[in-house]
Image (cartoon, rainbow, N blue to C red):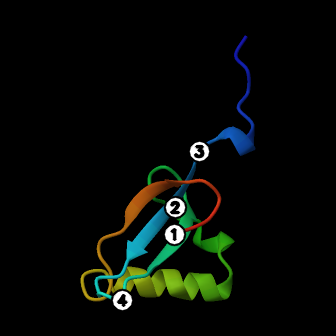
């Protein structure tokens, strides 16, 4: 019999948008292992940040990367 994996034991992922400037910084959003962000699950402010980061890829941010997380984003 297979044992069920609890939600807390599953890997967690984030979609990270790293700044292209020397000052650095990044924006990160929870996602699945494929990089899909649940936009309905983000609050209004986080949703606007996510849409901004997507729009600024190539200008202000590098292409996003899916990363495993250990709790904290970025």
Question: Mark 4 near mark 3, Cβ–Cβ under 8 Å?
Answer: no
Which residue is tagged 4? 23
**Vertical relation: 2 (above or below) 14:** above
Q: Alpha-carbon distance for marks 4 and 3?
A: 30 Å
**Vertical relation: 6 (above or below) 24:** above
Which residue is tagged 3? 11
Give neighbour class at mark 1: few <14, some 14-19, many 20+ (Cα, 10 Å): some
Picture residue at 47% right of the left edge, 83% below the top: 51
In front here: 26 or 57?
26
Q: Earlier in the sequence, mark 3 or mark 1?
A: 3
Give neighbour class at mark 2: few <14, some 14-19, many 20+ (Cα, 10 Å): many
Picture residue at 54% right of the left edge, 70% below the top: 29
Give neighbour class at mark 3: few <14, some 14-19, many 20+ (Cα, 10 Å): few
Which residue is tagged 2? 14
Which residue is tagged 1? 74
Q: Which of marks 1 and 2 is nearer the N terminus?
A: 2
Taking the image as shown, residue 28 lies to the left or right of residue 24, namely right
Q: Which of marks 4 and 1 is nearer the N terminus?
A: 4
Taking the image as shown, residue 4 lies to the left or right of residue 18, namely right
| Quarter of the figure with the N terminus | top right
Q: Alpha-carbon distance for marks 1 and 2?
A: 8 Å
Question: Mark 1 near mark 2, Cβ–Cβ under 8 Å?
Answer: yes
Camera-near label (1 vs 2) is 1
């Amino acid at each position: 019999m297979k044992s069920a994996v609890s939600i807390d034991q599953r890997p967690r992922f984030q979609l990270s948008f790293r700044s292209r400037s020397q000052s650095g910084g990044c924006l990160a959003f929870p996602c699945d292992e494929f990089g899909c962000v649940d936009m309905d699950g983000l609050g209004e402010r986080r949703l606007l940040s996510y849409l901004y980061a997507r729009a600024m890829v190539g200008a202000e941010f590098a292409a996003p990367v899916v990363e495993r997380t250990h709790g904290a984003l970025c």
